[in-house]
Amino acid sequence: MALPRSFQNLCSLPPNQRTAMGIKLLQRTMREEWPLVPHLRRRLTAAGLDGRRHLGLDEFHALPPESLARFLSQSPRDLCPQPDPGRIRQNWGWPRKLGLVLARGKGGQLLQRGYQANLADPLPDPLSGGREKRVQSSEHDEELLAEQGCRCLLLLGIEAGPLVLDPRVKIEALTRRALVGAARLLELPLGESPPKPGEDQGVLFTTKEALEDGALGSGEVVLLDPTGPEDRGMLTLTAARLVLPVLGDARGAILWDDLMLAEAHEDGIAMTHLAHHGTMLAKTVLNLPDAFGRLELGAKAAPFFPRLTQV
């Protein structure tokens, strides 16, 4: 099932249709992507599941969650898809097989290019046990990140430009790339300039017009990693390669269930990639910021997206 090509179309889908779409994406991911990831193949075998055949939802639920520490202890190569002709012939659907055939001799090169990591983001030390670990992203993942940035800006009401970053604030690389990509897709100019003296140094970015007028109204300021119940801003989860809008008013951070399957877990939230082509998460329990820890699912999460709520 193809994803809607615009955020507005995605939001307009009825909740049951979006749930059905997520299930189809999960099944496709398990069928076509998981057999390419060495670590996931080992996890399936350890759980008594046969990764050589198509897995159903019952098998997915039987796979126990994995801690982030154990996940990061694996070789980086074992966490990334390694496409090979044998597994493609066995697991991929006919449209993708046909694409390789039509590409003739260039099919293998195009396939490798689609999964090749072109960026590697370091995880913060508290998440990596003091050792530097990296989450790899492909060119495909970068496009998804730009789309996430667009969604954040639209949900937060930042539709006017040009956008101006505050150079005094330390911005995570993932957040910066999401903003740059979003500005490109929305055709908004993006620059850097410090706010006026005395303004909040937690400002991540605002509009140039707001800086000139000196009136920073709601929808014109976005904070980095907001933690207060009234704050609005952007929350970055590097391990999941997610940049989430935090809507404030105790509504928490919106999760995209077309990108991730999120499940409540006693030690945090278990996340599974549904669209990424880089480092592959599969029911991996993530350490979340202290201010967020409860997952709310279902139609209560406007606009029908699951969300992380503040503890």
Image (cartoon, rainbow, N blue to C red):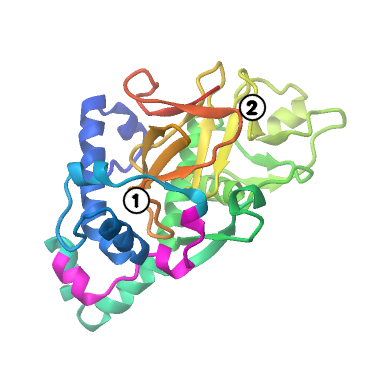
Counting from the top left corner in percent of width and height, residue 139 is at: 44, 62
**Residue most toward the bottom?**
105
Identified by mark 1, the residue type is: Ala
Q: Is residue 256 magenta?
A: no
**Is there any visible trace of residue 124 in the rendered image?**
yes
Report the residue marked by disc 2: 227
Q: Residues within 10 Å of mark 2 (few under 14, many from 20)?
A: many
Counting from the top left corner in percent of width and height, residue 239 is at: 51, 50
Residue at the spot x=63%, y=23% of the render? 231
Residue at the spot x=79%, y=44% of the render? 168
The tag earlier along the polypeptide, 1 or 2, is 2
Quarter in which the N terminus is drawn: top left
**Residue most toward the right?**
197
Q: Which residues are magenta?
A: 70-90
**Is there any visible trace of residue 33 in the rendered image?**
no
Name the one closer to the observer, 284 or 279: 284
Report the residue marked by disc 1: 275
Q: Residues within 10 Å of mark 1 (few under 14, many from 20)?
A: some
Q: Secondary structure at mark 1?
A: loop
